[in-house]
Image (spheres, grey):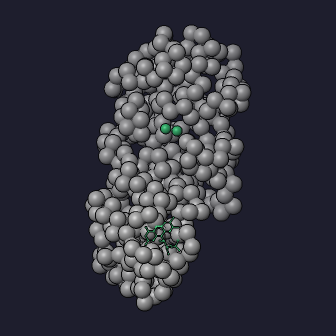
């Protein structure tokens, strides 16, 4: 598992304990924190892992290092899932030189109180390890300001930080010729197919807002002849590089497929009944959809499918003259992710004065979405007469067939 090449060794860990990543995002298949050793005349460690895995991590490093020492610790990203063991590495190898860019330096001081023996690198600068060089490229706001990536030209290998990363711990081999999504009983022989949904969920949940800066980074990296991507989460990509890079490009352009993401919230079931009626009508017309109950399910999955499908339909009852909060919260997150190019419709129940549908429409218009319906606000109980989901499904099916 650990030997990626003679020079590059995997020393990361699988986290199968954490329930919510960043305190918000569920991890049904776990997550991996990847870290790598590059062994040349000098030894460089690329990033670290989550603090609670210190023992396993140090074992992994020592097994590969033998009696050698670490000369450099490259810090591509300061989010604590990768940086929290910087102090431990410095304590264990007191001469280790930290390699970081100028934006990272104050963060290292702030988190670890360390401000000595830091080698500050600029865009395009290289550091010799003996026979090989590490070259550093800045990738600001993918998804933190200090983010950079590290290129090992002799191995055509990109240490990409969170870019091209995915939720899901890695089973089997770490490289994508034979890695599996941990705990997924539907696991296939194709690692990209295995991880694709978890990659989209990771991207939409965490990086989603930064489409423009991801695009800038992809453009910059397109000059490199990449044969291996060592990201900080998920498999090491070798076999599936074209698919992974194309998918990242597609996600960061907010490009979607035909289909509908239905996200609804309901207190007493009336809005919920309408949501299920829409699903049944879409089914009849052969339109693909994904349904999300925002009251009982984590919003993480709804964002995942928002990034998949070109039409978003949101259901919410009126609540204190406003949008029922779970649906408002979801829509707030849609706006925060700067999602573009979506078709939109809203529906919801009220009792004395409907407000939610009008307010949902206003939010969607602010995001630049195209309203494909004026929305369906209905009083009290759901009925097909009050809320015509067959008509909405017709409209969606017709919109989808437009381009065919
Ligand atoms: C705390 C609370 C606040 C509400 N505020 C409003 C309101 O401002 N205007 C309104 O017409 N209905 C309001 N309602 C009524 C709901 O919109 C109505 O019961 C609706 O049918 C609920 O839809 P659901 O069955 O999908 O949860 C409120 C209900 C609750 C419990
Ligand atoms: Fe991160
Ligand atoms: Fe990360």
Q: Position of residue 360 (x, y in %)?
A: 36, 65
Camera-nearest residue between 278 and 347:
347
Q: Position of residue 30 (x, y in %)?
A: 64, 47
Identify the residue at the far front of this view.
352
Q: Look at 47% across and 46% down and name the residue there.
A: 206
Identify the residue at the far bottom of this view.
385
Q: Is residue 224 left or right of residue 6?
A: left
Q: Look at 42% across and 75% down and name the residue there.
A: 352
Q: Look at 40% across and 63% down and name the residue there.
A: 322
Residue 83 vs 393, above or below: the answer is above
Residue 325 shows in this picture? yes
Camera-nearest residue between 298 and 203:
298
Q: Quadrant of the N terminus?
A: top right
Residue 339 vs 161, above or below: the answer is below
How many marks are shown on the rendered structure? 0
Q: Position of residue 93 (x, y in %)?
A: 62, 13
Q: Position of residue 3 (x, y in %)?
A: 63, 34
Q: Look at 68% across and 27% down and name the residue there.
A: 54
Residue 36 shows in this picture? no
Camera-nearest residue between 276 and 171:
276
Q: Which corner quadrant of the image does residue 16 belong to?
A: top right
Q: Quadrant of the C terminus?
A: bottom left
Camera-nearest residue between 133 and 117:
117
Residue 390 vs 175, above or below: the answer is below
């Amino acid at each position: 598992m650990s030997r990626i090449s003679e020079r590059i060794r995997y020393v990361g860990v699988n986290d199968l304990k954490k329930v919510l990543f960043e305190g918000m995002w569920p991890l049904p298949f776990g997550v991996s924190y990847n870290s790598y050793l590059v062994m040349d005349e000098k030894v460089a460690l690329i990033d670290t892992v989550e603090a609670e895995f210190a023992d396993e991590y140090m074992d992994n490093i020592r097994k590969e290092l033998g009696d050698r020492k670490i000369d450099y610790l490259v810090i591509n990203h300061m989010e604590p899932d990768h940086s929290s063991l910087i102090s431990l590495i410095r304590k264990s190898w007191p001469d280790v030189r930290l390699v970081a860019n100028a934006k990272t330096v104050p963060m290292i001081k702030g988190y670890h109180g360390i401000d000595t023996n830091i080698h500050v690198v600029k865009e395009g600068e290289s550091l010799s390890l003996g026979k090989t060089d590490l070259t550093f490229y800045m990738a600001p706001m993918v998804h933190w300001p200090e983010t950079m990536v590290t290129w090992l030209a002799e191995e055509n290998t990109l240490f990409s930080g969170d870019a091209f990363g995915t939720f899901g711990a890695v089973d089997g081999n770490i490289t994508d010729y034979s890695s599996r999504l941990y705990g997924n009983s539907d696991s296939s022989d194709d690692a990209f197919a295995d991880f694709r949904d978890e990659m989209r969920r990771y991207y939409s949940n965490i990086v989603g807002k930064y489409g423009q800066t991801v695009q800038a980074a992809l453009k910059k990296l397109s000059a490199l002849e990449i044969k291996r991507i060592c990201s900080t989460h998920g498999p090491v990509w070798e076999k599936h590089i074209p698919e992974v890079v194309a998918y990242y490009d597609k996600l960061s352009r907010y490009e979607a497929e035909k289909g509908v993401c239905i996200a609804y919230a309901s207190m007493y079931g009336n809005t919920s009944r309408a949501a299920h009626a829409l699903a049944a009508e879409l089914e009849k017309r052969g339109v693909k959809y994904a349904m999300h109950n925002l009251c009982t399910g984590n919003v993480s999955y709804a964002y995942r499918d928002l990034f998949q499908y070109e039409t978003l339909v949101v259901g919410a009852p009126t609540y204190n003259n406003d949008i029922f909060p779970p649906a408002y919260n979801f829509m707030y997150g849609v706006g925060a992710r700067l999602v573009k190019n979506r078709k939109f419709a809203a529906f919801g129940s009220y009792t004395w004065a409907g407000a939610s549908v009008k307010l949902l429409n206003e939010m969607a218009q602010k995001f630049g979405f195209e309203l494909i319906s004026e929305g369906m606000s209905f009083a009290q109980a759901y009925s097909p007469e009050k809320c015509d989901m067959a008509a909405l499904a017709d409209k969606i099916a017709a919109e989808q067939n437009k381009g065919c």
